[in-house]
């Protein structure tokens, strides 16, 4: 995982509520345990027409959404099953942060554990962001704020351990590996055999 300290991008908007993990990555694409290539299936049934061509009605296929790495969504994003493939698909697609007034807990945990910033804002802040697609945003993970084009800021909360892992580019296992010397010292001081 790479450190996630600052994200600077235009915003793309999917205003629908209750976008579940099956909509993010349909179950038929869950046959892999690797992350690479899942981006091509991200929002697959929404993003493509039956003949495999881009669906021109899908918001992320619009020219103004191309290249955006910040996704603003309707409420209850990531509901449904607990598939870790959903944040993998979003990351492989190029999304670095998802912002909503409500993000399903399991999805949010999976996202943060995999380096996808999942930010919960107030309903009023969400409505404002939804109404202004394509604006330049800067997300500062250390400062826990979103900088708006007019100089305003939207603050957000991150659990301290998730924030630490994002800033240092480690998951929970990587964090434990970084603590090997301290663990060995504690074990030695408490008579624990290695």
Image (cartoon, rainbow, N blue to C red):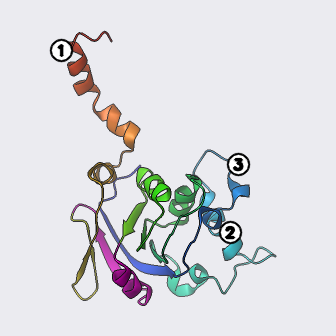
Residue 174 picture location, percent across and down: 37, 38
Q: Which of marks 3 and 1 is nearer the N terminus?
A: 3
Q: Dot 2 surroundings within 10 Å: few (below 14), some, or many (20 or more)? A: some
The span from disc 3 to disc 2 (Cα, nearest Å) is: 15 Å
Tell me if 68 is positioned left or right of 36 in this view.
left
Q: Which residue lies furthest to the left in this view?
A: 189
Q: What residue would you read off at disc 3?
A: 31
Q: Quadrant of residue 182?
A: top left
The span from disc 3 to disc 1 (Cα, nearest Å) is: 46 Å
For the point 47% across and 53% down, which residue is it? 110
Q: Earlier in the sequence, mark 3 or mark 2?
A: 3
Q: What residue would you read off at disc 1?
A: 189
- Using the image, determine if residue 152 lies above or below residue 138: below
For the point 63% across and 69% down, which residue is it? 43
Tell me if 188 is positioned left or right of 169 in this view.
left
Secondary structure under the numbered disc 2 in the rendered image: helix
Q: What residue would you read off at disc 2?
A: 44
Between residue 189 and residue 89, name the one nearer to us.
189
Q: Give the range drawn in magenta.
A: 121-142
Residue 81 within the magenta-colored segment of the rendering: no
Label 3 with label 1: CB-CB less than 8 Å: no
Per the rendering, the mark at residue 158 is none
Q: Residue furthest right?
A: 51
């Amino acid at each position: 995982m790479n450190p996630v300290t600052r994200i600077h991008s235009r915003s793309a908007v999917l205003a629908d509520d209750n976008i579940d993990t099956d909509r993010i990555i349909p179950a038929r694409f869950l046959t892999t345990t690797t992350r690479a290539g899942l981006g091509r299936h991200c929002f697959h049934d929404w993003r493509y027409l039956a003949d495999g061509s881009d669906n021109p009605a899908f918001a992320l296929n619009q020219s103004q959404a191309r290249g955006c790495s910040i996704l603003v969504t309707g409420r209850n994003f990531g509901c449904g099953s607990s598939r870790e493939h959903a944040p993998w698909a979003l990351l492989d697609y190029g999304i670095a942060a998802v912002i909503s007034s409500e993000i399903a807990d399991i999805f949010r945990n999976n996202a943060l554990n995999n380096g996808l910033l999942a930010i919960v804002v107030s309903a009023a802040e969400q409505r404002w962001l939804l109404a202004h697609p394509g604006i330049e945003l800067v997300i500062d993970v250390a400062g826990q704020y979103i900088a708006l084009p007019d100089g305003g800021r939207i603050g957000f909360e991150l659990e301290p351990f998730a924030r630490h892992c994002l800033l240092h580019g480690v998951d929970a296992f990587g964090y434990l590996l970084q603590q090997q010397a301290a663990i060995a010292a504690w074990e030695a001081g408490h008579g624990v055999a290695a």
